[in-house]
Structures are given as structure tokens and as C-alpha cells.
Amino acid sequence: MNTLILAFHPHPARSRVQQAWLRRLRDAPEFHVHQVDAAYPDWRIDVAREQALLERSRHVVFMHPLYWYSVTPMMKLWLDEVLKFGWAFGPGVDRLAGKTWRHVVSTGATQADYQAGGFNEYTISELFKPWQRSAAMVGMRYLPPFLLHDSHSQDDAALARSGEQLLDALREPLAS
């Protein structure tokens, strides 16, 4: 497995964006799609399984909506449970060193809303500083996020285009 797509969404069946992206990614053999919320409806994460998936992957992609200016509750739990001291980081620990970390994010607001003076006041880069630091803490290389803004107004054709753009963006680090 080269690229692990960890898909998080509290209501995946209602997300046209995530469904479109997942359909497109499942057709690409170089990606392993793992829908974390569906795998753990009881919120009891199989930490050993998740860590094994990470160890077998060179690139890790976190797909999620922007949820209260951050990640979804399940993704936060996953990070807390899976990226443990002594396994993901700490003295002499390098299991994730050199792997890439990337977010694939849909937002309900426009790109202009995520700027100084915009409705949300902060850029996505500013909001994602904790995740950039988390990647560094576990030795991973943080890549810029793939973003789809104003997701609620996207028609089917726009979602299909974004799926193709996503595929191209995720294949880019595979060439290096």
C-alpha cells in the first residue's frame, strides 16, 4: 500500500462531496481508502490495526470536512489513540519518519471567508498550524491541504471536476 486515505465524516451518507471523492479514489489502485467512522461505529478504535495501516503506507491523507474550524470528533479521537507516545513519537521512535501527511478538506464557506478580514478571520493555513506541528512531532512531512471551498453550492459536474483534481493532487507526491 502506497497511499492511505483515512476518510472521516460524522454523516458520510449525507456528504455529496465525500461520496464523490470516495467514488473517484476507490477506482485508483494506488490508494487504500479506509472509512474510519464506518469501521468504528462504537468509537472503539483498533489501535494496532490503525498503526499497521500507517506502517504499510508511505503517504497518509486525512479526508474530512472542516468541522468547527478543525477536524471531526472521530479524527481527533483517532489522532489521540493511534499516534501514541512510544509508538508514533518519543526518544528513538521513527516509525512515521519521512512519510507524508496531507489533509483533503471541504468547507462550507468561500475561500474569501478564510482570509484576514473575511468572515472567518483566519486562513486555512493558520487554522491548521496544530496539524502541521503534529506532523512534525511524529516525523512526517506536512504537505499543503487540498481544499474544496463553498462545498454546499457545488453541482455534480463541479464535484466530478474536484474529484479529478484531487486524484491529480494526490498522485503528485507519488512521483517523488
Image: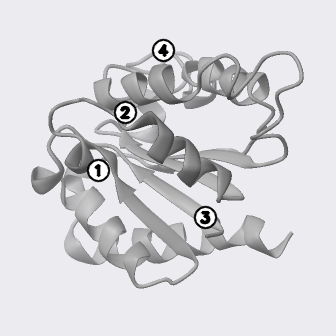
Crowd rating for badge 1 (residues with CA inside 10 Å; few <14, some 14–19, many 20+): many
Q: Return the x and y of residue 98 as percentages of the image width and height.
A: 84, 46
Q: Amino acid at mark 2?
A: Leu
Q: Nearer the viewer, mark 1 or mark 4?
A: 1
Q: Foreground residue, 102 or 91?
A: 91
Q: Amino acid at mark 1?
A: Ser
Mark 3 or mark 4: name the one nearer the start of the chain: 3
Q: Report which residue position mark 1 lands on.
A: 151
Residue sitting farthest toward the left: 14
Labels 2 and 3 touching (C-beta < 8 A): no
Q: Report which residue position mark 3 lands on.
A: 3
Q: Report which residue position mark 4 lands on.
A: 121
Mark 1 or mark 3: name the one nearer the start of the chain: 3
Q: Residue at horizontal 40%, vertical 85%?
A: 27
C-alpha gap between disc 2 and disc 4? 15 Å
Label total for image = 4
Q: Residue at horizontal 23%, vertical 29%?
A: 43
Q: Report which residue position mark 2 lands on.
A: 66
Q: Residue at horizontal 29%, vertical 57%?
A: 18
C-alpha gap between disc 1 and disc 2? 11 Å
Labels 1 and 3 touching (C-beta < 8 A): no
Question: On the rendered structure, is 97 left or right of 67?
Answer: right
Q: Is residue 59 above or below residue 37?
A: below
Q: Residue at horizontal 72%, vertical 58%?
A: 58
Q: Nearer the viewer, mark 2 or mark 3?
A: 3
Question: On the rendered structure, is 96 left or right of 102?
Answer: right
Secondary structure type for disc 4: loop
Q: Quadrant of the N terminus?
A: bottom right
C-alpha gap between disc 1 and disc 4? 19 Å
Mark 2 or mark 4: name the one nearer the start of the chain: 2
Question: On the rendered structure, is 163 left or right of 16?
Answer: right
Q: Is residue 154 visible?
A: no
